[in-house]
Structure formats: C-alpha cells, structure tokens
Image (cartoon, rainbow, N blue to C red):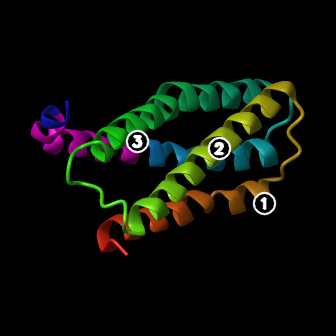
C-alpha cells in the first residue's frame, strides 16, 4: 500500500490542495452569511428561509465534502513514506491547526442549527470576529508546512 501511495503522491497532493481551497472558501463565507443573517433578518421571514437554505447548502454540499476530502487526502499524504518527519515540530503544529479548523467547522454547524431553531444568540459582531479564526489556523498550517519549523 505504501508503494502505491508513493506512486500517486503528486495526485494526492494536488487533490489535497484543491480540497483545502474549497473548504477554506466555505469557512470564510459561512460566517459572513451568519453576520447578515444575525443582523438583517427577522426569524420566520421569507429572507430567514432563504438564508437557511443558502447556509444549509453551503455546509452540506460544499463544506462537508471538502472537509472530508481534505482529511482523506491529508491522511493519505501522512501515510506516504518519506513525507512526514515525526521528529520535527511542523507536523504537530499542522495537526493542531487542522484540528482547530475542524472544530471551527463544527462550531459553524451548531450555529446553523440554532438559526434553524430560531435560538441563535450570537451577534453579528461576534460572527465578524469569528470570521478571522480560519485565517489564524490557515497561517499556522501554511507556515508549518512550508517553513517546516
């Protein structure tokens, strides 16, 4: 199996990068939708239903598959011989960033459920602040992988 992973390494790496891009797009966009949903939309209105539809589709049709693909191709890279030096710090900092991004993804999913139930108490300002969270994790991950510190 490890020989096979080495043979398809360039494809795995390319698919991993594409998956990360799709996932990050959703992680940046969904909190922005939440800002407008929290600030401009009355619960139970037609606009509320439209926002819920957009948020559900973004999460289920783009973000969830992209996260799963990112994890799948990332783990394939981890198990490719010679790619990860576990005695270095960088794989551990990258893993921390990926786990943080996964937590944020699920945090957004819970907020979406609160919008559906009409119980979301998070303010638009708080969603604006939380919109910066994926950037912090992205910086940690990219610097870890590229600089290999």
User: Dots 3 and 1: beta carbons under 8 Å?
Assistant: no
Residue drawn at 78 percent across, 54 percent down? 124
Where's residue 107, x and y in %? 70, 43
Residue 123, given in percent of the width and then of the height, sits at: 83, 53
Q: Residue furthest left?
A: 7
Could one spot residue 121 in this view of the protein?
yes
Give yes or no for residue 39 being in the magenta stretch: no
Report crowding for label 2: few under 14, some 14 to 19, many 20 or more residues within 10 A (C-alpha): some
- Secondary structure of the residue carrying tag 2 is helix
Main SS of residues in magenta: helix
**Residue under pointer 1:** 125
Assess disc 3: are there few (<14), some (14-19) or many (≥20) residues with their C-alpha within 10 Å of its C-alpha.
Answer: some
Tell me the mark number nearer the camera, choosing from 2 and 3. 3
Residue 44 seen in the figure: no
Residue 8: percent from left, percent from top: 14, 37
Q: CA distance from mark 3 to mark 1?
A: 25 Å
Mark nearer the N terminus (2 vs 3): 3
The residue indicated by pointer 2 is 33
Contact, CB < 8 Å: mark 2 with mark 3?
no
Residue 68's disc number: none
Q: Which region is colored magenta?
A: 5-21
* Residue with the mark numbered 3: 22
Along the horizontal axis of the image, is 25 left or right of 17? right
111 to 60, vertically: above or below:
below
| Residue shown at the point (30%, 38%) measured from the top left | 76
């Amino acid at each position: 199996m490890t020989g096979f992973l080495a043979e398809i390494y360039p494809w795995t790496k390319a698919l991993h990068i594409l998956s990360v891009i799709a996932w990050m797009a959703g992680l940046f966009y969904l909190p922005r939708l939440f800002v407008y949903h929290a600030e401009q939309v009355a619960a139970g209105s037609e606009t509320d239903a439209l926002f819920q539809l957009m948020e559900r589709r973004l999460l289920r049709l783009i973000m969830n598959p992209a996260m799963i693909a990112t994890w799948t191709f990332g783990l394939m890279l981890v198990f490719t011989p010679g790619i990860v030096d576990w005695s270095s710090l960088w794989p551990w900092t990258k893993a921390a960033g990926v786990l943080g991004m996964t937590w944020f993804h699920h945090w957004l999913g819970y907020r979406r459920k609160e919008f559906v139930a009409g119980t979301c108490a998070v303010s638009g300002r708080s969603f604006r602040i939380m919109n910066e969270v994926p950037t912090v994790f992205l910086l940690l991950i990219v610097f870890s992988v590229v600089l290999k510190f």
